[in-house]
Image (cartoon, rainbow, N blue to C red):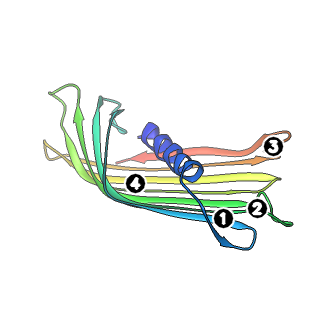
Amino acid sequence: MRKLLSITACAAAFFALSLPVSASGAGAVSFTQTFHDAVQTMPVPNPCTGAPGTVTLTYNGVAHATFLTSGVGAGTGWETFTATGEFAFVPADPSQPSFSGKFTTWDGDNENLRNFTTTATFSLRGTGSDGSTLNFHDVAHITILNPLTNPTIVVRFDKFSCR
């Protein structure tokens, strides 16, 4: 699921940088994009056992970004992405249990000319075809000083738990 969290964060960044923006105030541009019944299928390992497999996500979500384009705050921006829905994990090894259940993910970024910070969370709860449970939570964070001139990572962590 770490890979899934990374993919989610990358997807949020992709949408933040590639979707059309519209003026939302003097010197600012913003956009909001919603997703309804979006479906993604990708190869991922079971986050708790490492068993390879494929996950299919069906979700609703929203991405939002605002950037200041002029004045003292030019270069400052905020982005956020939230999605919640259902997942189905099918292991490559048919002797392993499949899992289905619910998930929620969130990502938030803040940047200016002096620093950049992002935090992401991912949680899922599922039931296996053998009656077992899969409970996974991940939180990742990074803070970078001087991102444009001399990038220095001052905080970075990725903490996950399985039950």
Residue corresponding to mark 1: 29
Question: For the residues marked 4 and 3, what is the alpha-carbon distance in whole angstroms?
Answer: 32 Å
Q: CA distance from mark 1 to mark 3?
A: 21 Å
Q: Is residue 146 left or right of residue 125?
A: right
Measure how far apart labels 1 and 2 are at the Cα level: 7 Å
Q: Nearer the viewer, mark 4 or mark 3?
A: 3
Judged left or right of residue 148, residue 132 is left
- Circle 4 — which element? strand
Residue receiving disc 4: 123
Residue labelled with disc 3: 148
Q: Which mark is residue 86?
A: none
Whether the residues at callouts 1 and 2 have beta carbons within 8 Å, the answer is yes
Q: Are marks 2 and 4 in contact (CB under 8 Å)?
A: no
Relative to 126, residue 56 above or below: above
| SS class, disc 2 | loop
Please name the residue that numbered disc 2 is placed on.
Answer: 69
Q: Earlier in the sequence, mark 4 or mark 3?
A: 4
- Label 1 packing within 10 angstroms: few (<14), some (14-19), many (20+): some
* Callout 1 secondary element: strand
How dense is the environment of label 2, judged by Cα within 10 Å: few (below 14), some, or many (20 and up)? some
Q: Amino acid at mark 4?
A: Ser
Q: Residue at x 59, y 49 (%)?
A: 17
Whole-angstrom CA distance, mark 2 to mark 4, is: 35 Å
Of the numbered discs 1 and 2, the one sitting upstream in the chain is 1
